[in-house]
Amino acid sequence: MIFLRYCLLALILVGSSLAQGTGEIGQCYLNYKNKTFVCSNYISQSDYIYIDGSNTDDSLRYLKVAQGLSILKPNDQTQQCIDAFSSYACALTYPKCQEDKASLQPLCQSTCTNVISSCASSSDPIVLNYIIQSPLFPKNETCSAKIINTTTTSLTIQSDQCNSEQRLSPASTCFAPLIEDIMYTIDKSKTLNSQYCLNGCCLPCPQSYLLYPSGYLEKGFLATQIVRAISAITSFIIFISYLVLPGKKSHPSSLILFASLSIFLYSSNVFFSLGNPRMIQCTNAVEPSTQENNALCGFQGAWLVFASYATAVWIGIIIVNLHLHTVWNSNIIGKEYVYLHLAGWGIPIILTIIALVTKSIMYQFATLCLVQQSQANFIFFYPLAAIVLPSFFVHMATFFHIAKISREEEKRKSIESEITNEFTAHKRHVLQVIKIQWRALLLALLLVLTVIFYWIFYFFQLGNISNGPTSKEFLFEWLQCIQQGKGQDVCSEIASKHMPPFWLLIAAEMSPSFIGINLFCIFSNASLWREWKQWVSDLIPTRKQIEVPDQFFAI
């Protein structure tokens, strides 16, 4: 009986010892999570570190901010302070295990004292403030002690026979939405992009999205893309209607055919980027697309430039035709269609070639490539204005002439005065023209107002979008906010001082997206659908229209 008691006691002691040993070994893990964490540059892949579940990167938040801020004003003294404190804080938070994995490596006293000496000479008060605020920052008496108690365990301090393992190269901490510059990590003399990267951290493409609260521009521009896709479909319906229906093939209806084609080409441009705008916007994680590094961007941009000019030219032709027909009772445009096509398609082709030859097409705004902002006025907006503004003035002249005729008509009704037959005939002609072509007049007015509104927005507001992320003063203020871990939503308040209001930005992008829908609403009337019904009935005859010969029934 006594023998059994001793055996039972021995088994309990051995089992307890084994359990304890197994627990210690099980708490030493190889590799520190992954390469994106705070201590990834101070713990090598071959290191076993002690983890019991309570040690996490949350306790290193002050260190992480200090590492992030170091990219703004890099200097040797500040980097030495951050490097020393990182090595010390990571050693405390994630103690390294001995080779037997049953005990922990001692902490070198020099690792502790280096923090105090290095940070005493730091010249960056913002970075130093975050380091000193950390609960892990050592005091003089801490470094002279023999044991340091941490949140996870206790570490002994030794001053001699320290582990002289070479320290890994420190890297910058990049807070979201910034991303790591992988080229800089490998070689500090290289970078993914010198314009959008700074000391190991990069502004991901598209850069303008970062300056608004997270997800705002993605959702806003998606809405404009959906509207533009609907415009492409509706304008295509009008184009097919005026191409197929017999009653729409004569002048001046044929002008609507070519205008609807150009509007369809303009609206259908959205299908290049719908669902995946970044294949147009960016050539890699950082660099925006240009016609040289992204052929799809170049083709889409050329398509957009051509369609924009073609739409403006054909709407201008409609306005001039309406003016000549209304004011001068002239039908000269209806007799010169060869010259109309030379102007309607030739001018857009020439201006598009100029944009391509000067290598001006690139991504800077919204979801599509267009002429870059520095060249946009001379290559895109000024030529567009040369087309639109004269059209606008001709449109106003036509409007005032119509208003004059209307006033004369009211005067004639109120005062029974004699009116010459010549004036009466002209008045009837004008009213008849307006009755027939008021839709074309309304379409032209809406398009002119849309172009003017977008141009004013671009001229006064849009330049900030392309200049903002590259402005050193603004960039520093915004990066300082981001690298303090405050997040994109909070830091967008800083950007709001320099950027157009979100609602105005979306309104400016939405206004031209409605062109195809406006075309459909104006020209999709009951008469159009009656013509379609008649065309279908002529194409597919009914049973009554099919004459079956008597021989068919003969046996």
Image: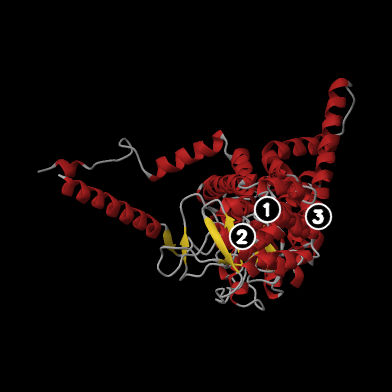
Which residue is identified by label 1?
134
Tag 2: amino acid: Ala
Q: Earlier in the sequence, mark 2 or mark 3?
A: 2
The alpha-carbon separation of the residues under discs 1 and 3 comes to 48 Å
**Mark number displayed over residue 459:** 3
- Seen in the picture, residue 253 relative to 309 is either above or below; the reply is above
Image quadrant occupied by the C terminus: top left
Report the front residue among 117 and 437. Answer: 117
CA distance for labels 1 and 2 = 9 Å
Instruction: Report whether 225 appears left or right of 101.
Output: right
In the picture of the structure, the residue carrying the numbered disc 2 is 89
Residue 177: % across, % down: 62, 55
Q: Disc 2 vs disc 3: Cβ atoms closer than 8 Å?
A: no
The amino acid marked with disc number 1 is Ser
Q: Residue furthest front?
A: 2
Q: Are marks 1 and 2 in contact (CB under 8 Å)?
A: yes
Instruction: Estimate the x, y position of residue 344 in percent, counting from the top left.
Output: 68, 61
Q: Quadrant of the N terminus?
A: top left
